[in-house]
Amino acid sequence: MRGLYAGLCSLILWSGSALAQTPVYVSHLQGAFQWDLQPFTTENAPESHVLTCGGNSVTVPMPATSTPITDVVPGPGQYTCVLYAQNGAGRQAEPDVPFPLFESGYVPGQPFQLQVLAEPEPPVMASRLQNGITTHSGVTNMTRAFSSNVSSGSLLVVSAARWRSFDSALYIAGDLTKSAGTATIGSPTLHYSAAAGSHQVVGIWSVLVTGSGSLTLQVAHPSGGTYGSVVAAEYSGTWDSSRTEASNTGTGTGAAADSGNATSAGAAVFIGALTTDHSGTPALTEDAAFSLLGEDEDASARIQHAAIERIVASGTTDSASWTIGASTWVTGVVVFKEASGGGGAASSRYHYVANQ
């Protein structure tokens, strides 16, 4: 009669590529059970192993001697996990049966305790819900209408750039207002405004949505003859008056525009804005780490203007930078962070503590 190998299996946990000692913390998503085999003959070779934790079991065919934790452990709790080998002749006895000797090809499995501790997910990053740009020529007030309704609690970030002959007056917070729509907004904050030469001005504002609905924003100017554009973007998340984490500004001449570095302590949204005094249509090429929110390269008709974004999951230092046509330029970067406790937490990852 064919028998089962008489070696006792030793069961351990491993995480990544390194075998773990006991006790050990093991990732739910990356950890695995692994066991060692004692020598066996052809007659008593195991064909598979069965690992049971609580009411869940997984069968692992030979020659494999490991299985992911997620295949057998469903979530938080305490489990008595047992391993046994089996072949066509039978299986090992249940580990809780005290077999002092090998009998009829059955060998007790080796139990161990597994404690499962909940581990929070990393904070969920803010996400951009919508964005766009509207260009204007020869107007008094520039506007930008959101294509979809904005949502209560969202963060709106706006950048505007204008050209008006020999008018380099900087923007103020009150230049940004709601001009139409059913949504309501809070009081805008002006984070940055600078002039490039005698005619060009750029700015960055943010404002919170206090009531959902349609929305058109307006960037005002006291007199007509304004040429420029408005870029606006909406971000989900948990935002409040402490949302500004860092900022920096840069000004210079040449073909490389850079705001200088700003730093976030954790997850954040970096927003950069640029204008130049170029009179042609050279390309504005943003830093590869950033995404374009909107740009107008045609300075022959209006003014060069670009706004860019980088969303990060952890502490980051970066600047808003572009390659441009050689000119005088000004640029700024603002870092927005969510309110303390923002981003939420999930319970889909766990740490495991194993004790023999």
Image: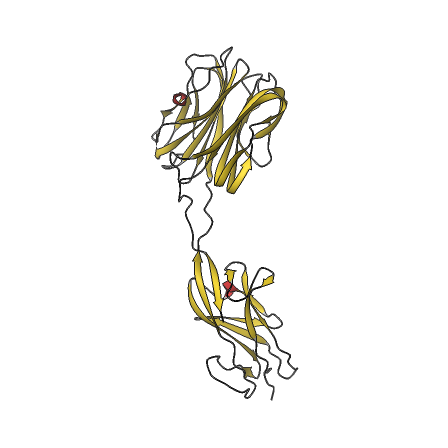
Residue situated in front as seen by the camera: 193 or 140: 193
Q: Which residue is drawn at 54% across and 64% down?
A: 32
Q: 346 above or below 136? A: below
Question: Is residue 116 visible from the viewing direction of this image?
Answer: yes
**For residue 340, side relative to residue 92 (left or right):** left
Q: Quadrant of residue 85?
A: bottom right
**For residue 333, side relative to residue 324 (left or right):** left
Question: Is residue 147 visible from the viewing direction of this image?
Answer: no
Q: In which quarter of the image is residue 5?
A: bottom right
Residue situated in front as seen by the camera: 5 or 225: 5
Residue situated in front as seen by the camera: 91 or 183: 91
Q: Residue 204 at what x, y percent from top left? A: 47, 26
Q: Which residue lies furthest to the top in this view?
A: 166
Q: Residue 310 at what x, y percent from top left? A: 53, 36
Q: Residue at x 52, y 58 (%)?
A: 29
Q: Which residue is drawn at 57% across and 75% down?
A: 48
Q: 330 above or below 48? A: above
Which quadrant would the N terminus be assigned to in this image?
bottom right
Q: Residue 38 at what x, y percent from top left? A: 62, 77
Q: Which residue is drawn at 55% across and 15% down?
A: 197
Q: 286 above or below 72? A: above
Q: In which quarter of the image is residue 141?
A: top left
